[in-house]
Amino acid sequence: MSDQINFSNSNKSNNKEPLLYLCHRIPFPPNKGDKIRSFNILKKLSEHYDIHLGCFIDDAFDKQYVGTLAKYCASVFYLDQHKTIAKIKGLTGFLTNKAITLPYYFDKRMQQWSNRTLAEHKIRKVFVYSSSMAQYVQSKSGGLGDEYNSLERVIDFVDVDSDKWRQYAEKKSGIAKWFFNREYKLLAREENAICAQFTHSLFVSADEAKLFRDNQPQAQQTKVHGVLNGVDVKFFDPGADFSKESLVPDVPFISFTGAMDYWANIDAVLWFVEQVWPLILAKQPDAVFCIVGGNPSREVSALANNKGIVVTGRVHDVRPFIEQAQCVVAPLQIARGIQNKVLEAMSLNKAIVVTTMAMVGINAEQSTGVIITDDSNTYAQACLALLSEPPKALTNREWILAHFTWQQTLQPLMNYFSTKESH
């Protein structure tokens, strides 16, 4: 299904310049990593522009929130995305020598709406969230789409997605290794082509931006920037009122939060349960580990059969599972960018035990209540210590307030768009 909704409320203003915003997933509700960032950027841009949003909805649960976007958008066009059909479409990339990500997210109805919206509203500025959506405003070989070259196009890659595929390939063998390596190389080629065409390329941290910048020709390097993620410090405030969640254990527990159909999160909890959890149970047999997040995969759901493990699925309010835990873990083995789960736990001033990858870009090693280790034995010992005695005088929230509020992190965003007067 597709639908276009025009909002004729006070959000639309003749004083605001129109802007096309293309996003691979509806940026509301901000309840998972990519949507938290895409929503907060949308919110910031809506202060300056009349936003015309084009997006996919890949979870029927999210459709109820389309009307909520009236507060931030002049119009919204969305397409229902059925994952099985999208995967089949993705496989056509093998016929065209493209990364499967591109046909996975291509729909001619989105292309037609995008072109029509650009023309009808005389839009000169475009913001693209994720590399998969750049194809709708990208010039193709043979002169196709050259009209897009006159647009001011800013893309938020967020992470170097191609490098995730490289990391996946390292963990595989045989045909799977070949498949992931192919996607890594083709997606990297696409990312470079986008950077060459677009006005600015944004990434979620200075580290991520440097990784990408170092692989670009010198002429492109000044167009690559880091714009940090933030956290809603009013929502993730230990003094806020939380919903009552029936699945919160009434005994000391450890928690992990995240979208549980995302491979990096699945891989993280599998590693923790296989490598760390038995060591914890050996010393504390009544310990409980809560895996909190929507759409748990088959492998994650099966973990509930293990002693002391609770798999919650989607919850109304994630905060009680963080705030009431003895500690929060983020044992990521595959990662890019900044982990929102870590920022949220720190904003609630919880002690965290994390791997090196989970802390990239946050740089909070000096904060009390942050334990970083990649060794399973050390990881277990840290969790056991926090289970037996809650730490005192943590400074994790202070670190977040000093470095990671959205007001601070999105401050540079408007620097990457020219003002109306400069045209």
Image (spheres, rainbow, N blue to C red):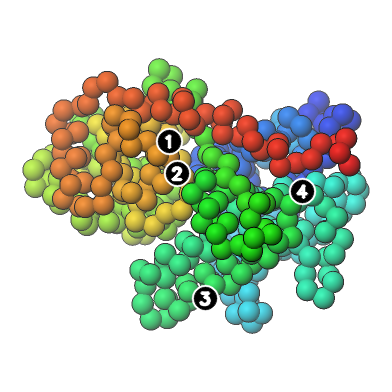
Three-letter code for the amino acid on which mark 4 is drawn:
Val
At 37% across and 51% down in the image, what residue appears?
357
Residue for point 42% across, 34% down: 344
Tell me the quarter of the picture where residue 420 sits: top right
Instruction: Name which residue lies at 34% across and 56% down.
Output: 333
- The residues bearing labels 2 and 1 have C-alpha atoms spaced at a distance of 11 Å
Secondary element type, mark 2: loop
Identify residue type, mark 1. Answer: Leu
In this orientation, which residue lies closer to the viewer: 376 or 27? 376
Quadrant where the C terminus sits is top right
N-terminal label among 3 and 2 = 3
Please tell me which residue lies in front, 306 or 207: 207
Q: Measured along the vertical axis of the image, is residue 253 above or below residue 93? A: above
Q: Which mark is residue 126?
A: 4
Nearer the N terminus, badge 4 or badge 1?
4
Q: Give the quarter of the image for residue 167.
A: bottom left
Type of amino acid under label 2: Gly
Q: Position of residue 231 (x, y in %)?
A: 50, 32
Q: Position of residue 126 (x, y in %)?
A: 76, 48
Secondary element at image label 4: strand
Which sits earlier in the primary sequence, circle 2 or circle 1? 1
Residue 182 is tagged as: 3
Per the image, the residue denoted by label 1 is 343
For this view, does 252 lie left or right of residue 80?
left
Disc nearer the start of the sequence (4/2): 4
Which mark lies nearer to you, 2 or 1? 2
Q: CA distance from mark 3 to mark 4?
A: 30 Å
Q: Can residue 13 be seen in the rendering of this structure? A: yes
Provide the secondary structure element on which disc 3 rests. helix
Numbered tag placed on residue 361 in the rendering: 2
166 left or right of 275?
right
